[in-house]
Amino acid sequence: MKNSIYTISIAILVLATSCLKDKVGDNLPYPEVTCSDTISFSNDVLPIIQNNCTGCHDNSNGYTFTNHHNIADNYAAIIGSMKGQGYQQMPQASSALPDSVIQKIQCWVNQGLKDN
């Protein structure tokens, strides 16, 4: 009986430990992005959105990217569109945004979508 309890305890410990190893990137939406600076919504993210998105996405066509709440709620669509992954490439009227610009938004998401 003692051996069975010991064996079961070891099995549970091994399973629990192996599950911890599976958590790559601390469950961040974009684990591949390295973020060395704190990204500010008002100083970094909002200007990117205003300069590249709100010309079309401002209450007139389904997506409204004029405030923190709407941008935070739609971050996956915004980044997907900027990268052309699963969404139509945006912005439509110009070339794709540089990866460094997209990564700023990804870092902001990884840092918790703060309204700072």
Image: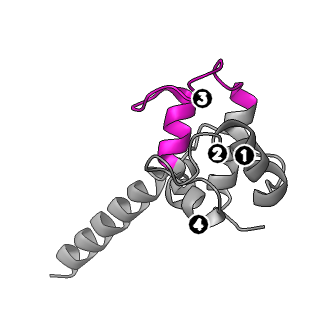
**Where is residue 95 drawn, in percent x and y?**
65, 17
Which residues are the magenta region? 76-100
**Where is residue 16 drawn, in percent x and y?**
38, 64
Q: In the visual, does 61 lie left or right of 28?
A: left
Residue at which label 4 appears: 69
Q: In the visual, does 61 lie left or right of 105?
A: left
Residue 50 tag number:
1
Circle nearer the N terminus (4, 1): 1
**Residue sitting nearer the eye, 61 or 113:** 61
Q: Secondary structure at mark 2?
A: loop
Circle nearer the N terminus (2, 3): 2
**Where is residue 35 drawn, in percent x and y?**
75, 45
Circle nearer the N terminus (2, 4): 2
**Residue sitting nearer the eye, 24 or 19:** 24
Marks 2 and 3, how far apart at CA: 10 Å
Residue at which label 2 appears: 54
Which callout, 2 or 3, points to the residue nearer the camera? 2
Q: Residue, x 68% and y 26% (percent of image)?
A: 97
Q: Amino acid at mark 1?
A: Gln
Residue at which label 3 appears: 91
Tell me: residue 107, above or below residue 67.
above
Q: Secondary structure at mark 1?
A: helix
**Residue sitting nearer the eye, 19 or 109:** 109
Marks 4 and 3, how far apart at CA: 21 Å
**Where is residue 3 drawn, in percent x and y?**
21, 74
Marks 2 and 4, how far apart at CA: 14 Å
Q: CB under 8 Å between callouts 1 and 2?
A: yes
Which callout, 4 or 1, points to the residue nearer the camera? 1
